[in-house]
Amino acid sequence: MTSKAPRYHSSVSSSASSSVIPSAAGGPGPAAPVSLAQRKRQLVATELTEAALQLLALKGFDAVTVDEIATAAGVSKRTFFRYFASKEDVVVQFLAGMGADIRADLAARPAGEPLSDALRHAVSVPLTTCGEHVERALPVVRLILRTPALLARFLEHQERWREDLTEELAARLGRDPRADLRPRLAAGMALAAFDAVLRRWSEGEGAADGAEDPDALIGEAFAVLAPALDSVAP
């Protein structure tokens, strides 16, 4: 009888096909209704990601194939590739929506707020949510950061976040990012803080053993960055 790896429970967010933690950002007003087709798609994506995490926990990343993930989820390999481009994506998708959360929160911050405060709050949104869901988030974050293929794909996502955040900062600052380095520099500093805090948090021992508080780490990071960030604003 084959033993099963511990089951990871994932919740579907609006910013990603499936996410190990709930999406923290949300716009005003009621959420748009979800169609039956969307719910079905979300369900299949969730089954694929849960199947992948169970197999990866049992066998390790390199030993697991797309065929095995699809079989474990009860779908065809062709169906797998309708949802995810690769084995890496089925895992990294758990964190992919964080960039949208950061941008959405920054867009909602008061116009006159110091830039360091606005970015600190925006970056804290997904990290704080990770801290509130340690048992679900920590194993996946560790898997991504400790597996070279997954880390490479996650960094690709972060590069897209950088472009999105640069665009949002350019609008906030009234600057053209093609002619002014400051929006891109500010985006880079904010995401460097995000990455440093995520890595430091992932090195903790979990909630029961006193994993560091992401909010405290964010405060520490932005205390260093605040003077430079606030000098960017007009």
Image: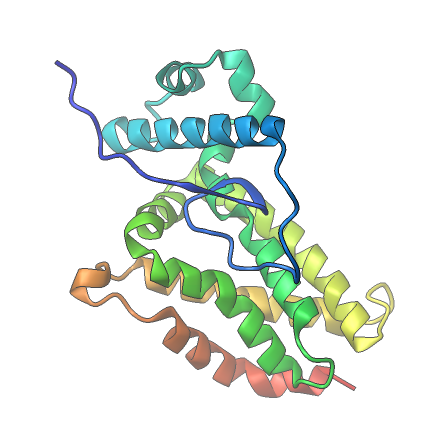
Which residue appears at 66% of the width and 62% of the height? Answer: 28
Q: Is residue 117 above or below residue 170?
A: below
> What is the x, y in percent for residue 155?
54, 48
> What is the x, y in percent for residue 84?
55, 28
Q: Front-most of 44 and 156? A: 44
Q: Is residue 226 above or below residue 190?
A: below
Residue 85 seen from this side: no
Q: Quadrant of the C terminus?
A: bottom right
- 135 relative to 1 in the view: left or right: right
Which residue appears at 55% of the width and 74% of the height? Answer: 121
Residue 28 seen from this side: yes
Image quarter for residue 47?
top left
> What is the x, y in percent for residue 106?
65, 69
- The furthest residue to the left: 1
> What is the x, y in percent for residue 102?
59, 62
Q: Quadrant of the N terminus?
A: top left
Q: Is residue 91 above or below residue 100?
A: above
Which residue appears at 54% of the width and 67% of the height? Answer: 123
Which residue appears at 48% of the width and 11% of the height? Answer: 76
Q: Front-most of 60 and 53? A: 53
Task: Give the number of marks.
Answer: 0
Q: Is residue 61 above or below residue 33?
A: above
- 141 relative to 14 in the view: left or right: left
Q: Which coloring applies here?
A: rainbow
